[in-house]
Image: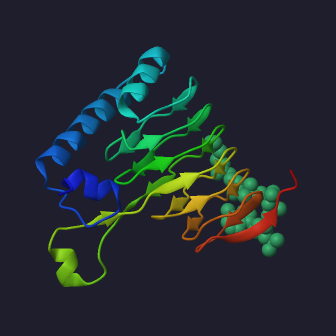
Amino acid sequence: MKTEKEKMLAGEMYNPSNPELMKDRENARRLVRMYNQTADTEGDKRTKLLKELLGSTGEHIKMEPNIRFDYGCNTYVGENFFANFDCTILDVCEVRFGDNCMLGPSVQIYTATHPLHPAERNSGKEYAKPITFGDNVWIGGGAIINPGVVVGNNVVIASGAVVTKNVPDNVVVGGNPAKVIKQIEV
Ligand SMILES: CC(=O)SCCNC(=O)CCNC(=O)[C@H](O)C(C)(C)COP(=O)(O)OP(=O)(O)OC[C@H]1O[C@@H](n2cnc3c(N)ncnc32)[C@H](O)[C@@H]1OP(=O)(O)O
């Protein structure tokens, strides 16, 4: 039989009050709190904390405080990752970034979701869908990425976009819901 954690990562309905999951979230909050209390002069400490918090990182990673994660360990970032202030990643399912990805301020990435039917939602059970980004993705400030979205390579997501569907390679998308604004010749 699957554990609640295995169900969660598989995108199935799971119980978030499960003790193992609560412990994982407490650990993430501890590391996030330490990170958000660091000074700008403590670059090495920030890198060390991010490497402890996240599932994996490249050599070069920078995130401006404050950061927020549900688990941290379910987020995997490639080489040269940068996130500006106030990045929120609800990584109930996996969030994966390729290389050279850059996030503007207040970007929000939500794998977490809930049943639409009120009786099912009120049961307390919930589920999530993974989110994936290719290489060379720039996400503008205030963009929201919804559960289950797959973003291609060489993509620009305009500021304030709400991305609800998959995004192909080499495009700029923007708006709510986000649509292709222009192609990028690569
Ligand atoms: C890592 C960091 O810290 S980044 C710092 C934070 N900075 C940002 O978040 C800025 C993000 N930049 C943007 O959103 C820009 O608008 C870009 C990069 C997406 C597009 O820039 P450009 O290629 O110069 O596009 P341009 O200004 O020519 O606009 C093209 C069309 O898209 C529309 N558009 C531009 N930005 C947006 C937007 N954020 N949302 C919706 N539509 C937009 C324009 O109105 C225009 O529409 P039209 O053709 O009907 O007139």
Q: Is residue 100 left or right of residue 5?
A: right
Q: Residue at x 58, y 25 (%)?
A: 60
Rendered-image quadrant of the N terminus: bottom left
Q: Specify whether residue 139 is in view.
A: yes
Residue that lies at the very extreme toward the front in this rendered image:
1
**So how many labels did they put on this image?**
0
Above or below, 117 relative to 87: below
Q: Quadrant of ligand 1?
A: bottom right
Q: Tell me: 186 left or right of 12.
A: right
| Residue under the image location 26 percent in, 38 percent down | 29
Which image quadrant for residue 152? bottom right
Q: Is residue 36 above or below residue 163?
A: above
Residue 39 visible in image: no
Q: Residue furthest right?
A: 185
Figure quadrant of residue 67: top left
Position of residue 44 measured from the top left corner of the image (x, y, whole percent): 47, 15
- Left or right: residue 35 versus residue 117 is right
| Quarter location, residue 66 | top left
Residue 43 in picture, x, y percent from top left: 49, 18
**In the foreground, 50 or 15:** 15
Residue 173: give x, y in percent of width and height: 69, 64
x, y percentage for residue 120? Answer: 20, 79
Residue at x 50% of width, y 31% of height: 57
